[in-house]
Image (cartoon, rainbow, N blue to C red):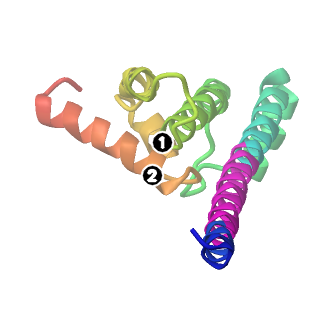
C-alpha cells in the first residue's frame, strides 16, 4: 500500500470516527435531556401533591379549619356538607392524591413494576369509586388520564353489577 492510500484511509477512518462520536454525543445529550425533563415533571407533580396533602391535613386538623376549607371549596350546587361529609371528602382527597401520584409514576414507567403499581391503584380506586361522592371527586381536578382510569373502573363495576 502506498503512503497516499494509507493517508487517504486514515483520513476516512478519522472522519468516520468523528462522525460516530458526534452521533453518540448527540444521542447521549438527547437521552439526558429527555430523562432530566421526565424527572423534573415527576418532581413537579410530587411537589404539587405534597402541597395538596398539606392543605388536606390542615383542613382535617380541627373543625374550625374544616369549616374554612369547606367555605373556600364548597360542594357544587352550594348545598353545605355536614362535618362528617366534609371530613370524608378531605380524607378522600388525601388517598386520591397518593393514588393519582402512583398512577402517574406507573404511566411514566418510574415504578419498579408498572403492572403491580397499576393493579394496586385499580384495587384501591375500585373501592373508592363505589361511592358516588368520592367518584365525583375523581372527575374534577385530577389529571384527565387518572380521571379516565377512575371512570373505567367505575363503569366496569357498574357493568359487572358489583356496585
Q: Decide whether the magenta segment is chiefly helix, strand or loop.
A: helix
Cβ atoms at labels 1 and 2 below 8 Å apart: yes
Residue at the spot of label 1? 107
Residue at the spot of label 2? 145
Q: Residues within 10 Å of mark 1 (few under 14, many from 20)?
A: some
Residue 1 position within the rendered picture, expressed as x and y whole percent measured from the top left: 57, 68
Q: Nearer the viewer, residue 114 or 75?
A: 114
Residue under the image location 57 percent in, 49 percent down: 79
Looking at the picture, does residue 145 appear above or below residue 160? below
Residue under the image location 66 percent in, 29 percent down: 94
Q: Residues within 10 Å of mark 2 (few under 14, many from 20)?
A: few
Residue 161 position within the rendered picture, expressed as x and y whole percent measured from the top left: 13, 28
Give the left or right position of residue 55, taking residue 10 as reference: right
Q: Which residue is at the far left? A: 160
Q: Which callout, 1 or 2, points to the residue nearer the camera?
A: 1
Q: Nearer the viewer, residue 82 or 26?
A: 26
Describe the element under mark 1 as helix, strand or loop.
helix
Residue 5 part of the magenta-drawn span: no
Residue under the image location 60 percent in, 49 percent down: 75
Looking at the picture, does residue 9 appear above or below residue 25? below
Q: Which residues are magenta?
A: 14-42
Q: CA distance from mark 1 to mark 2?
A: 9 Å
Amino acid at each position: 500500500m502506498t503512503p497516499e492510500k494509507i493517508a487517504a484511509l486514515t483520513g476516512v477512518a478519522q472522519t468516520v470516527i468523528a462522525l460516530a462520536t458526534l452521533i453518540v454525543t448527540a444521542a447521549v445529550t438527547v437521552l439526558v435531556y429527555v430523562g432530566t425533563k421526565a424527572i423534573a415533571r415527576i418532581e413537579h407533580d410530587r411537589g404539587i401533591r405534597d402541597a395538596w396533602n398539606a392543605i388536606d391535613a390542615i383542613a382535617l386538623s380541627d373543625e374550625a379549619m374544616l369549616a374554612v376549607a369547606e367555605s373556600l371549596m364548597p360542594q357544587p350546587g352550594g348545598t353545605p356538607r355536614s362535618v362528617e361529609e366534609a371530613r370524608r371528602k378531605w380524607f378522600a382527597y388525601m388517598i386520591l392524591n397518593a393514588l393519582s401520584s402512583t398512577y402517574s409514576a406507573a404511566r411514566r414507567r418510574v415504578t419498579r413494576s408498572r403492572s403491580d403499581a397499576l393493579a394496586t391503584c385499580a384495587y384501591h380506586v375500585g373501592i373508592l369509586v363505589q361511592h358516588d361522592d368520592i367518584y365525583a371527586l375523581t372527575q374534577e381536578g385530577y389529571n384527565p388520564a387518572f380521571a379516565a382510569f377512575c371512570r373505567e373502573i367505575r363503569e366496569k363495576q357498574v357493568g359487572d353489577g358489583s356496585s
